[in-house]
Amino acid sequence: MDFPLVINNPVKNPFVIPGLKKMQIDPQLNPNYTFEAFIEGDCNRVARRAGKTVAEKPGANSFNPLVIYGGVGLGKTHLAQAIGNEVKRLHPNKVVLYVSSEKFINQFMDHSRNNAINDFIHFYQLIDVLILDDVQFFAKAEKSQDAFFAIFNHLHQSQKQLVLTSDKSPKDLDGVQERLLSRFRWGLSADLQVPEYDTRIEILERKMKNDGLEMPKEVVKYIAYNISNNVRELEGALISLLAQSSLNRREIDLDLAKKVLRNFVKSSSKEITIDTIQKMVCEYFDVPYDKLLQKTRKREIVQARQITMYLAKAFTKNSLKTIGEHFGGRDHTTVIHSCQTVKDLMDTDGVFRENVLELQQKVQLAAM
Ligand code: ADP
Ligand code: MG
């Protein structure tokens, strides 16, 4: 058998340009965001199944682009990354890239300053599965939209897969060019809804199982019943409860859950205000209050500001718009971005995470 010979001398594919190797890039995926970990419910069935199809046959399906849209904390990033992880698992040679639209826009601007827009576009045109998160950030970024238009057309024509997420349905994406929006409609737009009670229980139980935690079923039900807005809050409640339990060396029971969740649930007895949180963060980081509200771009101040927005979102019932207004009239998209940044940094930066958790506890205690 001369099998090895075949491997050593593969038949040359006449279409492959000699010297052009497949690009090796880090797909920028969080390995925890898998389909397995993404609980299916009525709230997400269509999107989840479409995502699976896309991952099995990237590019060669009718969901191109796949647009996943829905409110904050409902699983858009998780699902989009699950598609990427699954593609890598099933088709290890495919070039997959996950990128937030914000990063894409920043990269574009860097390349534009260096007169290297063509390099930028060419790089993206070599990708097999491009996952672009939060395309609502494209609003008004005209030049970036032009670049993305060129990339989109090339990838789509070459049967490469595009996966996009957005906090709004494509038809409501103000500030995005009509020619892009019409392309977004070529494939499938699937939305993520707020999970129903049973799904919320299942999500909580899965998180606990993954982290090796246990708590009485009545507590799980209590959390799932009272926190119905989004999955991130659900997780936040679980984390707070665990933190309180270990801080006070106390078993988790319904009593503790009621106490801890008081500021998450509707029957909140003591209202925490954005002001209170701002003052607590200033004190904690030793940052002057007026700096927090101004446009200062110093790193410590920016981070303190982002954490404050994140906590305000988690602990008050104010809208993103209202929160933005409390920071010198910033836009709600700034608040969304801040919350996401804090979440991302908590995943990657241990010290940062400790700071946020400690602040979270302080805010919680203040609410009791
Ligand atoms: P979005 O991008 O829509 O703001 P994320 O994808 O960041 O939301 O999700 C927020 C959190 O909720 C993440 O930790 C994610 O793992 C979790 N999550 C969302 N939906 C589900 C689900 N169906 N099953 C399990 N976890 C979920
Ligand atoms: Mg997201």
Image (cartoon, helix red, strand yellow):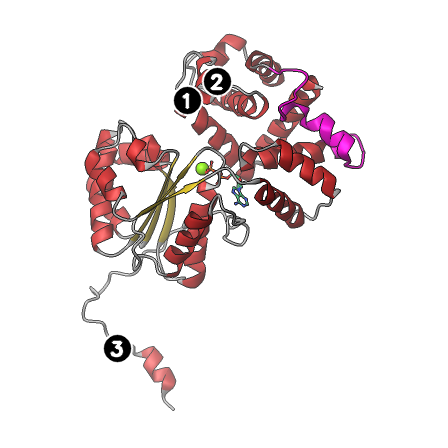
The residue at which mark 2 appears reads as 323
- Establish whether ligand 1 lies closer than 8 Å to the Cβ of label 3: no
Q: Considering only vertical position in the picture, is 308 above or below 249?
A: above
Which of the two labelled residues, at mark 3 and mark 2, occupies the earlier sequence position?
3
Q: CA distance from mark 1 to mark 3?
A: 56 Å
Specify the amino acid type for callout 3. Val
Indicate which disc residue 245 carries: none
Decide which of 12, 174 is in the foreground and name it.
Answer: 174
State the residue at coordinates (79%, 30%): 248
* Quarter containing the N terminus: bottom left
Indicate which disc residue 332 carries: 1
| 2 and 1 marks in contact (CB < 8 Å) | yes
Q: CA distance from mark 3 to mark 2?
A: 62 Å
Specify the amino acid type for callout 2. Ile
Decide which of 103, 4 is in the foreground and name it.
Answer: 103
State the residue at coordinates (76%, 30%): 256
Which segment is the magenta one? Answer: 244-272
Q: Is 276 left, or right, of 255 in this rendering?
A: left
State the residue at coordinates (52%, 49%): 38
